[in-house]
Image: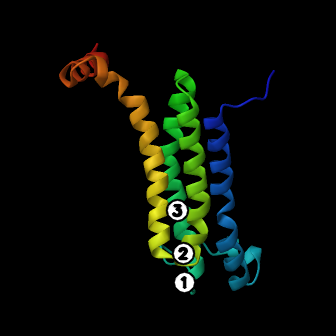
Amino acid sequence: MSNTLSPEMFWLAWTVILTALMVIPYAVYRIGKLGGIWQAFLAPLPGDAPFDDDWPHRAYRAHMNAFESIALFAPIVLIIEVSGLGNEATAAASAIYFAARLAYAPLYYFSVPIFRTAIWFVGLIATLYLAFYVAMPAFESESIAGVISQMSGGLTG
């Protein structure tokens, strides 16, 4: 069995790893603040503002934002993979998305709002590019009404 991934799946895997690792900064802070790992397990996070200092709260929010973002990115990458639609442009968009997410986290941690927002938009645009790349061919060959009719017929029939 070969262990080769498409570029899109490679960047999705690294995005999952990055998202998983983003818990470390605020978890370490919380463990230190509460006096050890056992105390951290005994005291669940209280609501949306569980930190006394600003930076761990920003790290937490960046992590939550990563989950929100990957919920859009991952399904599109999986559609591209399953349908065999991947090409150099989709590979580049996936790499750009990962790079944007990688840059976004420290910009959020250190409260750099203008660049953080710009980088967030880069990731969003990469995701939207992938989504439109998948969705637009349906509109090229038929009218929008025909596509909607096909979709509704497929759902009911």
Q: Secondary structure at mark 2?
A: helix
Residue indicated by mark 1: 54
Checking the image for residue 122, the label placed there is none
> How far apart, in angstroms, are the residues tagged by discs 2 and 3?
10 Å
Provide residue 38's location: percent of width, then percent of height. 75, 74
Amino acid identity at mark 1: Asp
Q: Is residue 13 left or right of residue 117?
A: right
Checking the image for residue 58, the label placed there is 2
Q: Residue at x 64, y 43 (%)?
A: 11
- For residue 56, which quarter of the picture? bottom right
Q: Residue at x 44, y 52 (%)?
A: 124
**Tag 1: Cα neighbours inside 10 Å, few (<14), some, or many (≥20)?**
few
N-terminal of the pair, mark 1 or mark 3, is 1
- Report the quarter where the C terminus lies: top left
> How far apart, in angstroms, are the residues tagged by discs 1 and 3?
15 Å
- Circle 2/circle 1 CB separation < 8 Å: yes
Q: Residue at x 53, y 42 (%)?
A: 93
As rendered, which of 156 and 58 lies closer to the eye? 58
Residue indicated by mark 3: 64
As rendered, which of 116 and 3 lies closer to the eye? 116
> How far apart, in angstroms, are the residues tagged by discs 2 and 1?
6 Å
Provide residue 1's location: percent of width, then percent of height. 81, 21
Is residue 45 something one can see in this rendering? no
117, above or below 140, in the image: below
137, above or below 32, in the image: above
Amino acid identity at mark 2: Arg
Q: Seen from this angle, which residue lies furthest top? A: 157
Q: Secondary structure at mark 3?
A: helix
Is residue 82 something one can see in this rendering? yes
